[in-house]
Amino acid sequence: ARTLARGTIASAAALMAESGAEPADLIAQVASPGGTTRAALGVLTGEGGLEPLLRDAVAAAVKRAQELAG
């Protein structure tokens, strides 16, 4: 699973860097409506998913950086 995850992330990052396309455009190209990727993305971007978690984590880091900066 780790190898698959690493390969997927590396490939996605390379595709984004090479194409200059927006992530949403790339997702539209590879995720079939009603398919497995769309199902997974629905969980990751839904309430309690990865996207809100990352947003909260970045906000916490920014807040703490501001506190440390005085």
Image: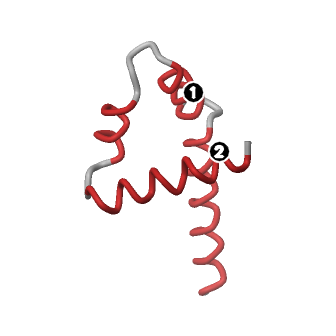
Q: Nearer the viewer, residue 49 or 61?
A: 49
**In the rendering, at what x and y percent does residue 59 appear?**
57, 59
Q: Amino acid at mark 2?
A: Leu
Q: Nearer the viewer, mark 1 or mark 2?
A: 2
Q: State the image quarter where residue 39 is shown.
A: top right
Q: Are marks 1 and 2 in contact (CB under 8 Å)?
A: no
Q: Which residue is drawn at the image coordinates 31% and 33% (left, top)?
A: 29
Tell me the SS state at disc 1. Answer: helix
Q: Is 35 rendered above or below residue 5?
A: above
**Is disc 1 surrounded by few (<14), some (14 to 19) or many (20+) residues within 10 Å?**
few
* The furthest residue to the bottom: 69
Q: Nearer the viewer, residue 69 or 33?
A: 33
Q: Mark 1 or mark 2, which has the lower sequence index?
A: 2
Q: State the image quarter where residue 43 is shown.
A: top right
Q: Which residue is drawn at the image coordinates 44% and 13% (left, top)?
A: 34
Q: Amino acid at mark 1?
A: Ala
Q: Which residue is drawn at the image coordinates 55% and 42% (left, top)?
A: 51
Image quadrant in which the N terminus is located: top right
* The furthest residue to the top: 34
- Mark 1 vs mark 2, CA separation in Å: 15 Å
Image quadrant in which the C terminus is located: bottom right
User: On the image, numbered disc 2 is attached to which residue?
Assistant: 4
Tell me the SS state at disc 2. Answer: helix
User: On the image, numbered disc 1 is attached to which residue?
Assistant: 40
Q: Is 24 rendered above or below residue 64?
A: above
**In the rendering, at what x and y percent does residue 49 appear?**
62, 35
**Is disc 2 surrounded by few (<14), some (14 to 19) or many (20+) residues within 10 Å?**
few
**In the rendering, at what x and y percent does residue 18 appear?**
30, 61
Q: Is residue 38 left or right of residue 59?
A: left
Disc number at residue 22? none
**In the rendering, at what x and y percent does residue 60 appear?**
64, 61
